[in-house]
Image (tube, grey):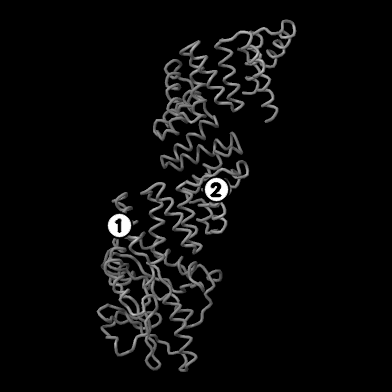
């Protein structure tokens, strides 16, 4: 875990555009968004 | 704050979609549970954690998070079970310890809480939550200095936290630092204006600072938020008593007593209130209960002895007097002068008896003017003096005028004056001396705050402090400076040496 939540969020945003409605992407993006504000 | 909530809202939307696309995924549920918790949807969070626990049991993170949510929902026992399991599955986790410490605090297991919070602090120092919680635990264990240190640190790490501030304020109050306590409680009140605990404690602090009207305002507000809080009711009862609203005071104290019978604080205020009203039986009953609760408390023991004597022996005699609550005008012939008891600032005092009651007569070295106007003025002043009643003031029974001689009649206090105890062969142990000091200040406070007009003694000294058979001190010679010499008795003008 590198704790680069901002970088992770950008990647997951791109993944969501390329392949929308992917549960894995969404799950992890949700978690990353949460971690960004913990 | 709104931005943060908006971001959690974004996270929630992603996790909701993930849950639709791939239901029953423990990771999604656990993560969504935590997001819901951050959005204060504790019930929704609990449902997600429950599902995650079924799908993937014995996950320390799920259990730790669910324990936290159960705590927020006030299910402290359930929270403790989850956190205990999390601690077994993943030992040495500071988050588990600090949360379990907080839950144990809520369950009144202060020693267990302290152990967990100490461990959490070692593993992860400088955590505001841990320090704040431990500070409160130490407060509950009466380690006020330790509590102050923890809360100081928590306050530096996370300023403007209302929980830290109000507990900081309460600890300072316990350490008698009322002015600083008030500053903290004011800040806490700005952050959370309707917190009943803050208002109630601030009310008590204002009471200690003798700002009774403002204290009452805070306690009224606290009572609106939490009408059945026994502490608020008891303190408000005391404050109303200080403001001479005895009916309101007894109403509050009665309510507090119904809600929580045998509360030592309520009983103490109740006893003092009834004492101020000369209701010795009610005061004695309250003191009896206090004695049962705290059999080794020397203060209670002494108050009880004194009240018992007051009720059994003194009250019937006083009630048999023709002028029950008024002072008596004695004729010279009915007073039987005995031996001299000593000479004071205003004249010689003689032992005497009247209708079987032992009394003391002070023959004033003062004659005043010999005319009808002067006599009327003297009698009026005697009536004022006779209206002053307090357990720690020598009771004035009446007066006698014979020609130019003026005599004052007092109850007889059998154990001589304090100077005889301090200078002679007699011995007073330290505890008794402390009791005496405290009680003398009560008598003085009565003169300063309960008498209209205010009375300043002007001559406090061991020779004017008389002790009864139970060593209850009674201040003598009060009010005479004004009556005999017209001294200005404005408390604000009295220099400090008057009270030495």
In the structure shown, which secondary structural element does the residue marked by tag 2 occupy? Answer: helix
Q: Chain of mark 1?
A: B
In the structure shown, which secondary structural element does the residue marked by tag 1 occupy? Answer: helix
Mark nearer the viewer, 1 or 2 = 2
What is the C-alpha distance between the residues marked 1 and 2?
36 Å
Res B216 → quadrant: bottom right
Q: Residue at x 32, y 74 (%)?
A: B319
Q: Chain of mark 2?
A: B
Q: Nearer the viewer, residue B470 or B66?
A: B66
In the rendered structure, find residue B137 and report the number of the disc placed on it: none
Q: Residue at x 35, y 82 (%)?
A: B362
Q: Nearer the viewer, residue B189 or B35?
A: B35
Residue at the spot of label 2? B224
Whether tag 1 and tag 2 are in contact, CB under 8 A, the answer is no
Compared to B192, does B74 lie above or below? above
Compared to B333, does B285 lie above or below? above
* Relative horizontal placement of residue B270, taking residue B219 as reference (left or right): left
Residue under disc 1 on the same chain as residue under disc 2:
yes
Res B490 → quadrant: bottom right
Q: Nearer the viewer, residue B348 or B173?
A: B173
Q: Residue at x 43, y 31 (%)?
A: B104
Quadrant of the drawing holding the C terminus of chain B: bottom left
Q: Residue at x 56, y 59 (%)?
A: B213
Compared to B484, does B176 lie above or below? above
- The tag earlier along the polypeptide, 1 or 2, is 2
Q: Residue B467: where, in percent of width, then height?
A: 32, 68
In the rendered structure, find residue B301 and report the number of the disc placed on it: 1
Quadrant of the drawing holding the N terminus of chain B: top right
Mark 2: few/some/many CA within 10 Å (<14, 14-19, 20+): few
Compared to B431, does B193 lie above or below? above
* Relative horizontal placement of residue B190, taking residue B440 as reference (left or right): right
């Amino acid at each position: 875990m590198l704790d680069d939540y901002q970088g992770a969020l950008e990647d997951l945003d791109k993944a969501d555009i390329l392949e929308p409605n992917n549960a894995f992407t969404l799950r992890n993006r949700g978690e990353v968004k949460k971690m960004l504000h913990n | 704050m709104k931005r943060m909530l908006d971001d959690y809202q974004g996270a929630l939307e992603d996790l909701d979609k993930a849950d639709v696309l791939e239901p029953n995924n423990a990771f999604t549920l656990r993560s969504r549970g935590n997001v819901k918790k951050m959005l204060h949807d504790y019930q929704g969070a609990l449902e997600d954690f429950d599902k995650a626990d079924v799908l993937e049991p014995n996950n320390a993170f799920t259990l730790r998070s669910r324990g936290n949510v159960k705590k927020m929902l006030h299910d402290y026992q359930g929270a403790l079970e989850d956190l205990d399991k999390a601690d077994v599955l993943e030992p040495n986790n500071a988050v588990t310890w600090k949360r379990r410490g907080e839950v144990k605090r809520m369950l009144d297991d202060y020693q267990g809480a302290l152990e967990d919070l100490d461990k959490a602090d070692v593993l992860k120092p400088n955590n505001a939550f841990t320090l704040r919680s431990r500070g409160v635990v130490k407060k509950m264990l009466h380690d006020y200095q330790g509590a102050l240190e923890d809360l100081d640190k928590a306050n530096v790490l996370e300023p403007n936290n209302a929980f830290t501030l109000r507990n900081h304020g309460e600890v300072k109050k316990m350490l008698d630092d009322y002015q600083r306590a008030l500053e903290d409680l004011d800040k806490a009140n700005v952050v959370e204006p309707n917190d009943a605990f803050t208002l109630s404690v601030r009310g008590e602090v204002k009471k200690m600072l003798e700002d009774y009207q403002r204290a009452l305002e805070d306690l009224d507000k606290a009572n609106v938020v939490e009408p059945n809080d026994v502490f608020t009711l008891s303190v408000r009862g005391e404050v109303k008593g200080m403001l001479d609203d005895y009916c309101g005071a007894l109403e509050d104290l009665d309510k507090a007593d119904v809600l929580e019978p045998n509360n030592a604080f309520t009983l103490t205020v109740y006893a003092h209130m009834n004492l101020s009203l000369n209701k010795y039986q009610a005061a004695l009953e309250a003191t009896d209960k206090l004695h049962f609760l705290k059999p080794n408390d020397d203060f209670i023991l002494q108050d009880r002895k004194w009240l018992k004597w007051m009720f059994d022996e003194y009250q019937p005699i006083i009630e048999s007097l023709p002028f029950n609550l008024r002072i008596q005008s004695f004729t010279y012939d009915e007073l039987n002068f005995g031996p001299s008891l000593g000479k004071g600032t205003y004249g010689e005092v003689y032992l005497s008896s009247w209708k079987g009651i032992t009394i003391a007569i002070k023959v004033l070295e003062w004659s005043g003017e010999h005319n009808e106007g002067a006599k009327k003025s003297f009698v009026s002043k005697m009536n004022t003096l006779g209206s002053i009643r307090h357990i720690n003031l020598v009771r004035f029974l009446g007066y006698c005028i014979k020609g130019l001689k003026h005599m004052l009649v007092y109850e007889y206090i059998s154990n001589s004056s304090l100077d005889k105890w301090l200078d002679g062969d007699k011995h007073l142990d330290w505890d008794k001396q402390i009791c005496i000091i405290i009680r003398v200040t009560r008598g003085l406070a009565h003169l300063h705050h309960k008498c209209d007009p205010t009375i300043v003694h002007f001559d406090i000294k061991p020779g004017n402090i008389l002790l009864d058979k139970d060593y209850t001190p009674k201040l003598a010679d009060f009010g005479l400076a004004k009556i005999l010499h017209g001294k200005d008795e404005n408390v604000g003008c009295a220099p400090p040496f008057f009270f030495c």
